[in-house]
Amino acid sequence: MHILGIETSCDETAAAIVADGRTVVSNVVYTQIPLHRQYGGVVPEIASRAHVEKIPQVVKDALTRPVDAVAVTYGPGLSPALIVGLNAAKGLAKALGVPLFGINHIEAHLHTPFLRDAGDEGEAVPIEESMPALGLAVSGGHTNWIDMPEYGVYETVGQTLDDAAGEAFDKAAKLLGLGYPGGPVIDRIAREYGHGDLMPFPRGRPREGVSALAGLDAELCVSFSGLKTSLLRYVQKRGGAEALAASGDLPKTVASYQEAIVQSVADRTMRALKRRDYRSLIVGGGVSLNSRMREVLSETCARAGVRILLAKPKYCGDNGAMIAALAYYRRNVDASLIDVSPSLEVG
Ligand code: KG4
Ligand code: ZN
């Protein structure tokens, strides 16, 4: 079964065809990053307009063969951006005379380690045998720990109480004058510096009983607002970003900040892994491209005795393939009749 997936929840206009939920047949991603760069973050109205302009061509390029269904992200994400994809998908499914399935963006990120390309060597990563799994969706919009007792069953057990990990990278880069998006540049600077001699930044452990926990266990949640403030104070103390850079201490600052994010995420992951007899950790989202994150999470999983399932780099960021693929396994939402759901929760 071939499904066309459409994704427009944030700043990527993307479409792809995936066969039987596994093998990517076509994959087209138009990234709007250059349009948002001068603002230091995604501007919803600009994103929406760019989706409107690009989606016809992106879908046309991805539609390399007939499909049996169309799938589309209906949440969570930016409302004006989601609307463009959903409307395009509704029109396309109707024109093609095929069903239209609505997909949760976060759940789709957690399918990315199972994606394959035609011609990939080796066995496909088994899905059922990877369960029960702990899912970690770590991106510019989300940092969630998700319990997956079996495939297709999701329950959020932990999350960030404020900024997502990617946002913490992006805001720090903005403060330090490193450009947008912050993750890749911080990753590069930190990799060159190493992680031997670092400054202690806060590890974002929320206090028990904070109302933002909304019933979740504080042990499995993170908060990056203290870390951000602590970086801001440090930069001010050093006379501003330019003075800090001129002193030569920027790489150490950046590497220390990254380490705080990575260790916070790894610490909560370890705590979550101890709660159940998990077989695997499934990681998805743009921040899972971070080289230190991949390294530390791999060590965490080795210690916990679970298998780590990471996506190929090209499937870490937002893409249509993850939407098309998950739709093969989850056809429970008829999207021809629904509206977008910007705050959609998993499960
Ligand atoms: O999954 P994604 O493409 O979009 C969302 O759904 O948010 O993630 C984008 C986020 C951005 O915040 C970006 O800075 C971050 O992923 N990112 C990284 C790296 N590459 C992208 N963060 C840390 N290290 C990286 N190498
Ligand atoms: Zn995403």
Image (cartoon, rainbow, N blue to C red):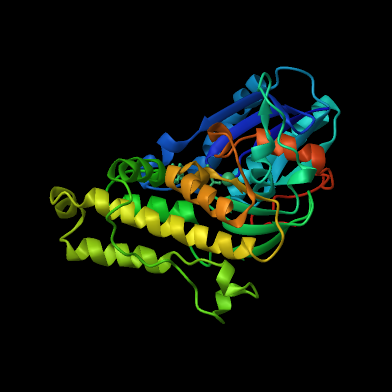
Query: Quarter-wise, where is residue 300 in the image?
Result: bottom right
As drawn, is 307 to the left or to the right of 168? right
Residue at the limit of the structure toward the bottom, as seen here: 209
Q: Is residue 226 above or below residue 198?
A: below
Q: Is residue 160 above or below residue 342?
A: below
Residue 243 spot, x, y in % from top left: 14, 54
- Residue at 81 percent of width and 26 percent of height: 95
The residue nearer to you, when weighing 116 against 12, is: 116
Q: Is residue 51 visible?
A: no
Please count the marks in the image: 0
As drawn, is 204 to the left or to the right of 197? right
Q: Is residue 24 above or below residue 307?
A: above
The residue nearer to you, when weighing 36 against 5, is: 5
Residue 247 spot, x, y in % from top left: 13, 51
Query: Quarter-wise, where is residue 60 in the image?
Result: top right
Residue 28 spot, x, y in % from top left: 60, 26
The residue nearer to you, when weighing 220 against 285, is: 220
Q: On the rendered image, what quadrant is the C terminus found in?
A: bottom right
As drawn, is 331 to the left or to the right of 244? right
Q: On the rendered image, what quadrant is the N terminus found in?
A: top right
